[in-house]
């Protein structure tokens, strides 16, 4: 069987139609955030993409959450209320948002801006010892791009499992940035997923890198949806 993952993306903007697609609690949450434009764009992308694929009015969608770590329903990986067979994942930076949606086991997506990978402790916080040689000797944009690839791959896996950064990213090992994406080793105390498919997501924006993870050993194809927020 092949799992089809639909991927949509949007540039952060302030189109007034975004606001009309959101629920009151999302607008209230946006008003409290410094990155309200990014949050509004991301949630508009979430509602519009899922609404389009499932044939539901975006504003009618209800989202539920459940934390993998503590079981709370106030935070954690979101799901689509009334559609348990679907899994989705959202990620955004200050300038773009991406969404992955699949009728499948759990899916996770992550997008990273190259500039956010420039902090000095990156290797220490993100990489296992045996991952470091593949990123040694790179500098400038090449180093930022390699870091963003590895970071996006790891976070996509941890968003698929629902652990997020409760799992130390340096305790999961992925392939080198220029190699086929795959999970190599799971060294965290938390239970490892039984299977993971990992794919890089090509983006038009050269300043970002993104990856998708699906908790399955079936083949996975990515289907790009057009300009969903037009
Ligand atoms: C998941 C996580 C890594 C994403 O952080 P980030 O890189 O800043 O953000 P991204 O833009 O990539 O993703 C944000 C989206 O991830 C999703 N998300 C949140 N928590 C998630 C989780 N545990 N698993 C999967 N997806 C999650 C939401 O859709 C969120 O969008 P929202 O802000 O509109 O609600 C981070 O929020 C995290 O580590 N959460 C877990 C915290 C936790 O569980 N603590 C223990 C509590 S007991």
Image: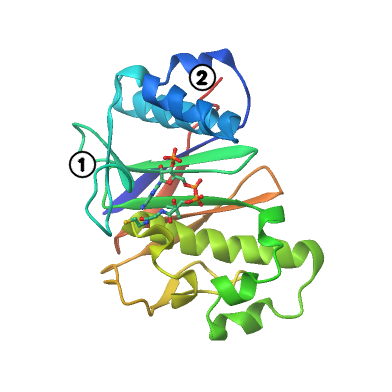
Q: Is residue 23 visible?
A: no
Mark 1: few, some, or many residues within 10 Å (few <14, many ≥20)? Answer: few
User: Residue 216: which quarter of the image?
Assistant: bottom left
Rendering coords of residue 180 (x, y %): 53, 68
Measured as percent of width and height from the top left, residue 52 is found at 38, 24
> What secondary structure is found at the residue carrying circle 1?
loop
75 relative position to 170: left or right: left
Q: Is residue 125 left or right of residue 206?
A: left
Task: Determine the image quadrant of residue 4.
Answer: top left
Q: Earlier in the sequence, mark 2 or mark 1?
A: 2
Which is more foreground, mark 2 or mark 1? 2
Q: Say if 174 sits above or below 205 in the image.
A: below
Give me the residue at 54% from left, 34% from top: 33
Return the residue at label 2: 18
Q: Nearer the viewer, residue 56 or 36?
A: 36
How are the colours assigned in the image? rainbow
Q: Residue 85 bears which disc, if any?
A: 1
The quadrant holding residue 148 is bottom right
Q: Residues within 10 Å of mark 2 (few under 14, many from 20)?
A: some
Q: Nearer the viewer, residue 180 or 40?
A: 40
Secondary structure category for the residue under label 2: helix
């Amino acid at each position: 069987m092949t799992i089809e993952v639909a991927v949509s993306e949007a540039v952060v903007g302030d189109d007034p139609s975004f606001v009309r697609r959101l629920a009151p609690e999302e607008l209230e949450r946006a008003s409290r955030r410094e990155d309200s434009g990014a949050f509004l764009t991301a949630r508009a992308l979430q509602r519009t993409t899922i609404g389009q694929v499932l044939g539901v009015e975006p504003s009618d969608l209800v989202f539920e959450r459940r934390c993998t770590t503590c079981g709370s329903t106030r935070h954690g990986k979101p799901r689509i209320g009334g559609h348990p067979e679907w899994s989705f994942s959202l990620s955004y930076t200050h300038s773009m948002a991406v969404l992955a949606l699949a009728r499948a086991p759990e899916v996770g997506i992550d997008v990273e801006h190259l500039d956010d990978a420039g902090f000095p402790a990156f290797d220490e916080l993100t990489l296992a010892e045996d991952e470091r040689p593949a990123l040694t000797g790179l500098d400038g944009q090449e180093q930022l791009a390699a870091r963003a690839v590895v970071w996006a791959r790891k976070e996509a896996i941890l968003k698929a499992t629902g652990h997020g950064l409760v799992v130390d990213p340096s305790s999961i090992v992925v392939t080198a940035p220029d190699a086929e994406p795959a999970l190599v080793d799971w060294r965290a105390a938390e239970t490892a997923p039984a299977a993971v498919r990992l794919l890089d997501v090509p983006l038009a924006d050269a300043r970002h890198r993104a990856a998708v993870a699906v908790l399955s050993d079936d083949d996975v194809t990515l289907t790009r949806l057009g300009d969903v927020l037009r």
